[in-house]
Image (cartoon, rainbow, N blue to C red):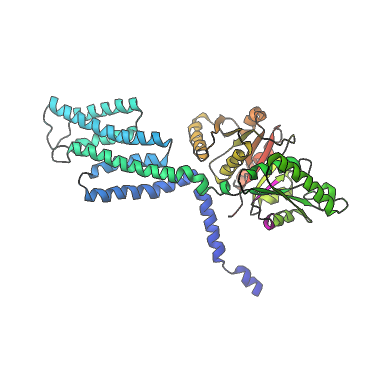
Amino acid sequence: MTDRGDRSRFDPRGFYRAIAVRWHRWIERTDNLLTLSVLVVLPVLIGGVTLLANHEPALPFLLFPPLASGGYSLFADPGAWRRDVRRFVGGLSVGAASGWLALEAATAVWYQVPATNVHAGAVALGVLVTALVTLALDLQAPAAFSTALLVHVSGPGGVDPVGYVTSVIAGSLIVAGAYVVWRRGLYDRRAGLLYESIEADDQVLVPVYGETATATATLGARIAGAHDAGRVVLCGLLDGTDPPAHPASDADSVDAVAEDLERIAAAVTDRVGTPVDVVVARGRADRILRVAHDTDCDLIVAPAVYADEGLAPFVRALFQSDLDVLVHDSRAGRTEWNRVLVPVRRASDVAHSMIDFADRLVGSGAVSVCRCVDAADERPTAERAIERLITAFDRPIETRVAVSPLETFLDAYASQYDLVVIGASRDRSLPSRILSPPTYRRLAGIDTDLAIVDRNYRS
C-alpha cells in the first residue's frame, strides 16, 4: 500500500518541469514566437502610443488604425529589418502626405470642401498618388492607403492636416524603433536565446560497434568540436548482441577493448582536434544511456544498425530516451562532410537541431535546406517557412522547394551531397505512421550518408 501511494503521489517539481519543457519547445518554433509577439508586443506598443497621445495633442487617435495594421505586418512577417522599417515608415508617411496634398489640390482647384463632406475627387486623387509612389518606391501599400484616406476626415472641424501628417511620421518612427529593438534583441538572436541545441549537444557519446564506428565517431567529434567545451566519449561494450559487443571483446578483455578505443580516439583527435575519452562498459542497450548520463553527455551519436522492419530495436530504443540522438548511416566510411542537405517538413525544434548539426559539420562548406510540396501553389508558404528557419543562422544557406515526393527528389539530387540529415518522424500521429512509414525507411536506396535526428534532451 505504501509503495502504491508513493508512486501515485503528485510531484509538483516534475509537473512544472514538464510544463517548462513543453513551453520551451513551443516557443522554439518561429511561427509561435511571431504569434506570441503579435499577441504581447503589439498590444503593449499600441497601448503605449495611446498613453502618449493622451498627454500629447499632436498625436491624434486617427493615426492608430494604420499604425496597428502596419505594425502587425512588421511583427507577423519579418523580413530584412532595414527594408521592413523603410517600407513601414515610408508607406505611412507617403500615404499621409499624398492624401494631404490631394486634399489641398482639390480644395484649390474645385471648391471649398464643406466640413460635413468628403471630396470624392480629392479621395480618388490621393489614392492615385499613393499607389504611384508606393509602387515606385516599394513601400508598404495597405498602411499607406489607410493614412491617405484618414487625412480627409481631419480637415475643417477636425485635426489639422499638417499636424496629422507630422503625427503619422512620429508614430511610425516610434513603432519602427520598437520593432528594431525586438528584431535585433530577440528575433535575430533567437537561435542563441531560445534554441537549446545551439548551446547544448556538445558533450557527445558514441557507442562503438560495427564497421563504420570510426566514421561515426568522427562525425560526433565534428559536431562537438564546433563548441569550445565540446568533447566526445567513445563507449565500447564487452558483451551482448543488441547492440553488438565490441569486436575486441571475444576474450572478455577490458584491456583489448580499451586499446582499440584509444586507437580510434587518437585518430579522431588527430583528424578533428576534439578531446576524446573512452569508456568500457558491460551490458545491453540500456547501458549506453547509463554511460551517457554518468559522463554528462547530452547527445548520443550512434552507428545505424538495421533489422527487417527498419532500424534495429536497440537503436529505436535510443529515440525513447531523455537525450538527443543522431543515428548515422555511413555509406562509404566518409569522415568529411562538406555539402549537407537538410529536408524539413515544418519549423520545429527538430528542424532547428538538424540545421544546427549541418552547420557544425560543414565548416566552410555548404548547407542546403529543402522542402517538398504536393502542388505548385504551396511553394510560397514553403519558401516563407524555410526562410524563417534559416534566418536564425549566420551562415548563408541555400534553400530549395520542390514539387515532388521527398524520395523522388533525393533519388535525383542526394548524390550531390555528402550527407542528408532527416528527422526521426516521432512527432507524427499513429494514422500518419500507418499510412506512410518514417522517412528513413523510404531512403534505403540513396548512395549518400544519412543522419537521423531526434530531440529528447531536457536541459
Q: Quadrant of residue 368?
A: top right
Kindly identify the residue that appears in the image at 33 percent across and 25 percent down: 136
Residue 1 visible to an observer of this rendering = no
Q: Which quarter shows the C terminus?
A: bottom right
- In the image: residue 325, left or right of residue 113: right
Q: Judge left or right: residue 149 versus residue 457.
A: left
**Furthest residue to the bottom?**
1
Of 257 and 349, which appears nearest the observer? 257
Which quarter of the rendered picture does the N terminus lie within? bottom right
Q: Can you say whether 295 is above or below 302 in the image?
A: below
Q: Does the magenta stretch include residue 297?
A: yes
Q: From what the image shows, is residue 36 above or below residue 100?
A: below
Q: Horizontal and vertical percent for residue 178?
A: 36, 44
- Tell me if 66 is positioned left or right of 223 in this view: left
Q: Is residue 38 above or below residue 417?
A: below
Q: In this image, 89 relative to 275: left or right?
A: left
Region of the chain picked out in magenta, as a range: 292-301
Residue 378 in view, yes or no: yes
- Tell me which residue sits at (23%, 50%) in the image: 54
Q: Residue at the spot x=21%, y=44% of the render?
A: 58
Picture coordinates of residue 426 (x, y %)? Answer: 62, 47
Q: Quadrant of residue 210?
A: top right
